[in-house]
Image: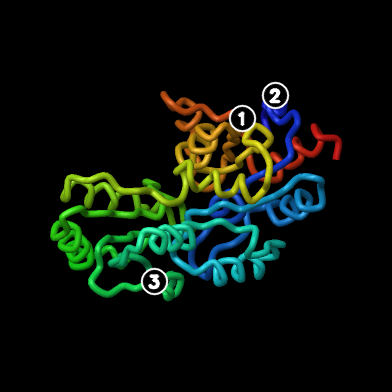
Amino acid sequence: MADDKWTDCVNNLKGVILDMCGVLYDSGEGGGFPIEGSVEAVKRLKASDLQVRFCTNETQATREKFVAKLRRMGFEIDITEVFSPAPAVVAVLKERGLRPHLLVHDDVVPEFDSVDKNNPNCVVIGDAADYFSYQNMNAAFRVLIGLKKPVLFSMGRGRYYKETDGLKLDVGVYMKALEYACDLEAEVVGKPAPMFFEGVLTDMGIQPHEVIMIGDDLMNDVGGAQQCGMKGLQVRTGKYRPSDERHPTVTADGYVDNLAGAVDAILKHCGQ
């Protein structure tokens, strides 16, 4: 880590929220692999006096499968500590009596088993990867354009993410296509939506200024956290690009080489 002056921003720190893909591990073939030092870094954080939560826009698997994969990598993570968009959007659908047409990855469909999907009156999209075919996009478009009051939920609005074989388009690109075609604005459930972060803060029972978010995505992780009153730290792993440190509208409270370096500095500053 080149500079730890940012540690001044963690005075009175009580909680840490960690992004997952690009911070804990790099996804890809075989499920991906841990980023060097991240397994031990999580272990050290959880052994400290700080509260730890994991906040992801992962929508290619159920939380159960996702957490099981990370445990196989060696991470000490409980499903109750993980906040992801699918359970959050299911709660919204039930609260508002909505029946979704799903444009999501097959592996996340079980998250919606408890929701009525007959005669849909809204559309939910997630990171569907190869399922984002013309046929499937057009089917979602037809549902929306046929509604008097079309409602589109997007599980995140990321532009791209990183896998072991390179950068991949994320759900936000397809969300924008449907917004444009149907002349509407999607409701984002997931980072950087304030409601999503506020749910994590409520679970922790602490105030925004007492929490730091660590992520590789400048806009959705860092910017989203800062809009909620938290501090945002960007790691130089995952989808990070050097140009992030010269962004015209979002500046992280600090930049670190990786999660291990961030945890070293945080625990040292906190005297742990």
Mark 1, residues whose alpha carbon is within 10 Å: few (<14), some, or many (≥20)?
Answer: many
> In the rendered image, which quarter is residue 232 located in?
top right
Q: Nearer the viewer, mark 2 or mark 3?
A: 3
Residue depicted at x 54% and y 66% = 63
Residue depicted at x 54% and y 50% = 22
Residue position for label 2:
5
Separation (CA) of disc 2 from disc 3: 48 Å
101 up-or-down from 206: above or below:
below
**Mark 1: amino acid:** Gly
Residue position for label 3:
115
> For the residue labelled by badge 1, is the local secondary structure a helix, a strand or a loop?
strand
73 up-or-down from 50: above or below:
below
**Mark 2: amino acid:** Lys
Q: Earlier in the sequence, mark 1 or mark 3?
A: 3
| Residue 115, x across and y down, in percent | 39, 71
Separation (CA) of disc 2 from disc 1: 8 Å
Residue position for label 1:
254
For the C terminus, the image quarter is: top right
> For the residue labelled by badge 3, is the local secondary structure a helix, a strand or a loop?
loop
